[in-house]
Image (cartoon, helix red, strand yellow):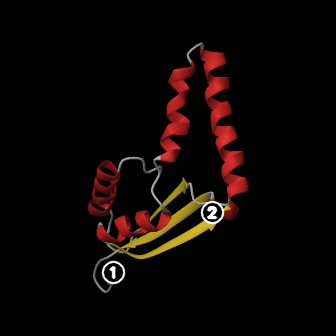
Amino acid sequence: MGFGGIAQNQLAIIVTARDQTAGGFWSALGSTQQFSSAVTRATQGFQQSIGRIGGLLAGDRHAYRYLSDSVRGFHAPEVVSDMIRHAGFAQVTLRKFLNGAVCMHIAEKAGAGHTS
């Protein structure tokens, strides 16, 4: 799950928490923009190439620009963890992979016998 706009994403997490059974688990895998400068440069180049390749194949480069633009709007993983806790999940775990380029959040829905 990517997190571009904070208002919509907080709402999505709140709705997920509301619908989740107490003691149930929720996880999200996403990209981040928090990694080393070498990885950042490589990622930016890859994102630009997606727009170019998609534009060539579809004949509309601007239709694919949203991909790279949306990644730049992702929240820091720690901000997402706070959003998850605020929504009512407990025991939020954050794991980072690929030198921080990808992260996974795992959370348990608070309920009887659980504290956040």
**Label 1 Cα neighbours within 10 Å, binned few <14 / some 14-19 / many ≥20:** few
Q: Quadrant of residue 68?
A: top right
Question: What residue appears at the point 61 percent right and 66 percent down from the top-left corner?
Answer: 96
**Depicted 85 relative to depicted 64: above or below:** below
Task: Please indicate whether residue 66 sits to the left or right of residue 96 in the image.
Answer: left
* Quadrant occupied by the C terminus: bottom left
Question: What residue appears at the point 47 percent right and 49 percent down from the top-left corner?
Answer: 2
Q: Quadrant of residue 81?
A: bottom left
In the displayed orientation, state which residue is furthest to the front: 37
Q: Which residue is mark 1?
A: 116
Where is residue 39 shown, x and y percent of the image? Answer: 70, 54
Q: Quadrant of residue 102?
A: bottom right
In the displayed orientation, state which residue is furthest to the top: 59
- Badge 1 vs badge 2, beta-carbon distance below 8 Å: no
Mark 1 or 2, closer to the camera = 2
Residue situated in front as seen by the camera: 80 or 90: 80
Q: Which amino acid type is shown beneath numbered disc 1?
A: Ser
Q: Which amino acid type is shown beneath numbered disc 2?
A: Gly
How many labels, in total?
A: 2
Which of the labelled discs sits on residue 34, or is there none?
none
**Depicted 93 relative to depicted 77: above or below:** below
**Depicted 84 relative to depicted 5: above or below:** below
Where is residue 93 shown, x and y percent of the image? Answer: 50, 74
Disc 1 on helix, strand or loop? loop
Question: What residue appears at the point 31 percent right and 86 percent down from the top-left corner?
Answer: 113
Q: CA distance from mark 1 to mark 2?
A: 25 Å
Disc 2 on helix, strand or loop? helix
Residue situated in front as seen by the camera: 114 or 91: 91
Q: Which residue is mark 2?
A: 100
